[in-house]
Image: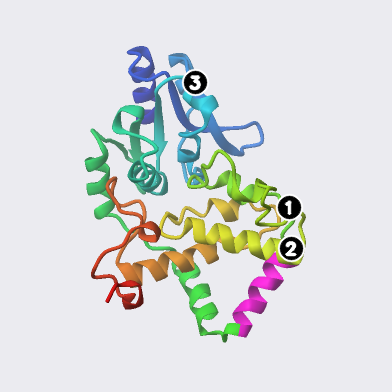
Amino acid sequence: MESIRKKAKELLEKNAVQVIIGYGEGLDKSVSAIFVRKPENAETLIFDDRCVHNLAVYLLKNEIKALGKPCIIAHLAALRTILQLASEHQITEDDVLVLGVTHKGELMEFAGFKDIEKYIASANIDISENEKEIINKLEAMTREERWQFWVEHLSLKCIKCYACRAACPMCYCSRCQVEYNQPQWITVEATPVGIIEWHITRAMHIAGRCVSCGECYRACPMNIPINLLNYLTVLTIKEKFNVSAGTSADLDSVMSSFKSDDKENFIKQS
């Protein structure tokens, strides 16, 4: 923790960056994102087991961009998010300085995206065993049973507050599809059909891009395991295309690119 504070203070003093995106502790011991702009305030930065939120969600926020070049304190999921955003041409190496934190709490300084790629290649990016167990139970169900599972979790609980969208670092569209009313693709109100439409649409938009950070689940006020729906797409894309999001700054988009050796023969011209 002290190494993070020392490095953050040094970067701000040298004006190498203008803001540090990191973690801070509130009076109630809760942890949230903080944005340190003065060297003397670097002492408020913390990093421990409670620091799980994906801070990379702030990199594309206009109000954060207005503060100047940021340095981000990034754990594994945030590092993967940075690479995924780079592969989608949303950020460049010049836009952000990245300080990684290993699972042991050690500080890592990255010279560029290639260094991050090397670190991620040696890291375990699988979802947890508990999550795998739940997904295996879902896949063992019949199609009708799985549908009923999601209907019960989504239609009967979701209040369509869009907290999952707000927390997701890959939901960065300036205007979401659900907000269009001419034409209106998805109903605005929290009806059973509208809720299912919303979550299925979002899952497809995140497919091939989700870095399994779990922010959607942590943000949900109704404790809906919506992350499992995204993780299912992660596992499917890994199996079918051998692609994992957030592993390269030059990653092709699985859902919007075509290769002649793709398995879906029906889309090839005869």
Image x and y of residue 15, in percent: 35, 14
Separation of marks 2 and 1 at Cα, in angstroms? 16 Å
- Magenta: main secondary structure equals helix
116 part of magenta stretch: no
Disc 1 marks a residue whose amino acid type is Val
Q: Nearer the viewer, mark 2 or mark 3?
A: 3
Which span of residues is magenta-colored? 144-156
Say which quadrant the C terminus sits in.
Answer: bottom left
In terms of secondary structure, where does tag 3 sit? loop
Other residues around mark 3 within 10 Å, as few (<14) / some (14–19) / many (≥20): few
- Figure disc tally: 3
**Residue highlighted by disc 3:** 66
Disc 3 marks a residue whose amino acid type is Ala
Say which quadrant the N terminus sits in.
Answer: top left
**Residue highlighted by disc 1:** 188
Residue closest to the far bottom: 142
Other residues around mark 1 within 10 Å, as few (<14) / some (14–19) / many (≥20): some
Relative vertical location of residue 14 with respect to residue 107 in this rendering, above or below: above
Classify residue 267 as left or right of residue 40: left
| Camera sees residue 44 | no
Image x and y of residue 128, in percent: 44, 64
Residue closest to the far front: 270
State the image quarter where residue 264 is shown.
bottom left
Relative vertical location of residue 261 with respect to residue 253 in this rendering, above or below: below
Classify residue 57 as left or right of residue 246: right
Separation of marks 3 and 1 at Cα, in angstroms? 31 Å
**Residue highlighted by disc 2:** 157
